[in-house]
Amino acid sequence: MVIGSGTPMLELRGVSKRFGAVVALRDGELTLHPGSIHAVVGENGAGKSTLVKIMAGLYARDTGEFKLEGQPVEFRSTAESKAAGIAVIYQEPTLFPDLSVTENIFMGRQPVARFGMIDRAAMRAEVIELMTRLGVTIDPDRPTQGLSIADQQIIEIAKAISLDAKVLIMDEPTAALSGVEVDRLFAVARSLRDEGRALMFISHRFDEVFSLCDTITVMRDGSYVSTVATDQTSVPEIVRMMVGRDVNELFPKLEAPIGDVVLQVRGLTFPGRFADISFDVRAGEIVALAGLVGAGRSEVARAVFGVDPYTAGEVTLKGAPLPAGSPAAAMQAGIGFVPEDRRQQGLVLESGVATNITDAIRGDLVRGGVITRKAENAAAQEWALALEVKAAALDVKAGTLSGGNQQKVVLAKWLATRPALLIIDEPTRGIDVGTKSEVHRRMSELAVEGLAILMISSELPEVLGMADRVLVMREGRITAELSRAEATPETVMFAATHAAEEVSA
Amino acid sequence: MTATQTTAAPTSAASAGSRLMQLLRRRETSILVAIVAMVVVTTAVRPTFVFSGDGWRSLLLNPAIYIVLAVGVAFVIISRSVDLSVGSTMGLTAFAIGSLYIAWPQMPTVVAFVAGTLFGGLLGLVNGGLVAVAKVPGMVITLGTMYIFRGINILWAGTTRINASQMGPDFLAFGNSQVVGIPALTILAVIVAIIAGWYLHNTRSGRELYAIGSAPEAAELYGLAVSRRALMSFVVSGAMAGLAGVMFAARYGTIASNAGTGYELQAIGAAVIGGVAITGGVGTVAGAAFGAFLLATINSALPVLGIDSLWQRAVVGALILAAIILDRVLAVRQKRRLIAERMEP
């Protein structure tokens, strides 16, 4: 099919957005045509969501052009974007759980009769008509609480249709849907396309992108890469454009002797989060859990550490089974857990460095019921030195340190417990490039000293550079286990976006 | 497939039956049953509770002020906030109206009611403005203004009190008049509740209050005017408290600086007992009004039943806890039911 004919419905050119020092979108570009379904693909952090939020009127762009039907537009609120005919369906539908389906569809723009009285009968009639047209039977009077994600999305779509939206943006709508539900959604999307609306579809599933969309735009690191017609490209080509960079030389990985199995996970399952997860981590080994955001990696790590429950499976540490749901037991047995959000979950920002470092070994420092500052400082000193924490003094508040140094304090806290296994979720998120390699060097050295490390990372270069083995997860399951030699950007990305059977085939 | 098994449009006969079931299952209905039971039991013990001019009058008149307060507070609670200042607003307004009568003895009764409502609304505007500007939860702001309004009242009144002789005779007569056996103040409260209920049920801005209380983040994404609606809810709550203050002055004729102390918790309690969820988004004006009626009836029935007045508060507290636990149980059960419905193949 011919792409680029006629006036585009929506056009973005050279759009950028920064938050303080962080550039979320460098150079966004997108052209949506009426009667077309346009896919936007890219790794996590490529800038897709920022692009969506700019179109939705949630963020104001810093630079660049934004045109709707050839006319420049400037949205200051979601209401303005909606009034202009742009409807956004987020991955997590945003409905009012206590209100009825009908009220959700019409909230803020209910038809009114005399005395400003809402015309309930007209609303209800239109909802029944919409539901018939979408081929579903959802009771218009029931509250939206308890509806499946699929039905909630149908309500969002009904909302968009009743708004007569010209542009319909779907941000990973299929992430939580089953096969049948996806088919239903796609049938609706195609019929909307045939009515001449412009649709945009964000997905990590290539099979869906290729079966539904006619055009694909690839983004990487906040920038536009390329726009291609679906019938003139292939999955490997798209993956190459998405990854497209040299990844192997960033981090010095030291050779570490691999020892005995430290952590053994078998058949770990929690319905709706992850299923049948089995893997080992050995002493001296760094194992990466790779995959896209929402694949269930952090959930697995939290279950292993005992923060979250699991319904089936078992976790053993150094041969001894670990009780489920008890972080205290996990710590006792020798697991350290560096969470993803260190400011919220890893540190007490208002406390000093020494207090933070000794937080996990308080019990050992007690002498006669009290902890003296002297004992605290002595214990903290050792680890602050070992990790080269750069702080003016040990009583400096943790919140005032840089991101990299905060991360070292969290690492120090767990190393002070002398763990056998360290779980690190996103070790370098929000840390500047120079400090990143230092954190990596530390991790590598710890592995040499015989620590078993389970690392979760969304950054492909980090995964490929640091890991001895890579476990790739997709939708709650492990789809591939790759050795250091086998792991390449392409193989990891492929496993992260395809079901296990397709990966092994 | 999830959607296909959800109920199709029911036939009219079945719908009439299910509507009756729905009505029976509503919170308003069970509160009404509780009120009737309370009245019947108390009357059996002492017939004058209902069957005497004075008993009948008190039974209907006592709830009036609580109803107006609870209806106002319901606006704020439905939008997921709370207004603790209504008792102080009520007291300050009552004193202001009394003072106005001293300055202008011929003031018509209507003017007193309108002025008091506007004055209360102005105090509500202070609350709402502070909440909107400072972006601090309403509970904290109104905890502050609760003390400030009361403090102003005490500074203004000192140890003096305003007596019936200082207020307009028409005004006091209205406060104690009856129309076909029903106290005028009660009729006023019911009319106010009906208007408020109609507004919340039938207008865009009324429905938006429910939406905001149900999911504030979603309300932002919908592009609803969240802070303007919140401001409005506090103005309504203040205006209702102001009206209640005028009613207080008209009924009792004596106003000291401590008038209305503790009424805020009674009003919130009444709304919660009536099914207005403290977590926002759920509840009706009718429920809040019935809750207020029940609370006032309990307050007057327990002494009649020979129960020590010290126990009254405990009974009210138990009732509030029971209502909250009931709400929670029902919410959890409904959620489970709705999920179970769609899990079926």
Image (cartoon, coloured by chain):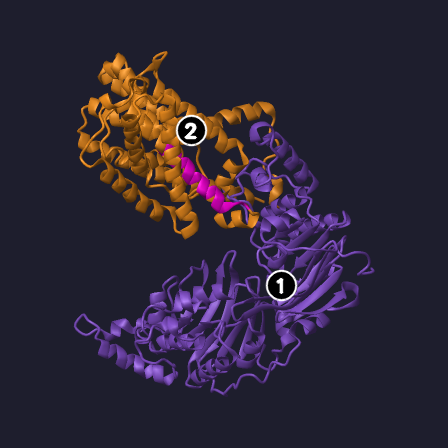
Chain colours: A purple, B orange
Identify the image quadrant of the C terminus of chain A.
bottom right
Q: Is residue B261 above or below residue A472?
A: above
Q: Is residue B69 visible?
A: no
Identify the image quadrant of the N terminus of chain A.
bottom right
Q: Position of residue B303 (x, y in %)?
A: 20, 25
Q: Nearer the viewer, residue A218 or B17?
A: A218
Q: Nearer the viewer, residue B180 or A281?
A: B180
- Whole-angstrom CA distance, mark 1 to mark 2, is 47 Å
Label 2 environment density (alpha carbons within 10 Å; few <14, some 14–19, many ≥20): many
Numbered disc 1: what chain?
A: A
Is B237 part of what is drawn in magenta? yes
Q: Nearer the viewer, residue A99 or B115?
A: B115
Q: Which residue is mark 2?
A: B286
Q: Specify the segment rendered in magenta.
A: B224-241
Identify residue type, mark 2. Ala
Q: Which mark is residue A48?
A: 1
Q: Is residue B168 above or below residue A212?
A: above
Is A120 part of what is drawn in magenta? no
Our reading of the magenta stretch's main secondary structure is helix
Question: Which corner quadrant of the image does residue A315 belong to?
Answer: bottom left
Q: Secondary structure at mark 2?
A: helix
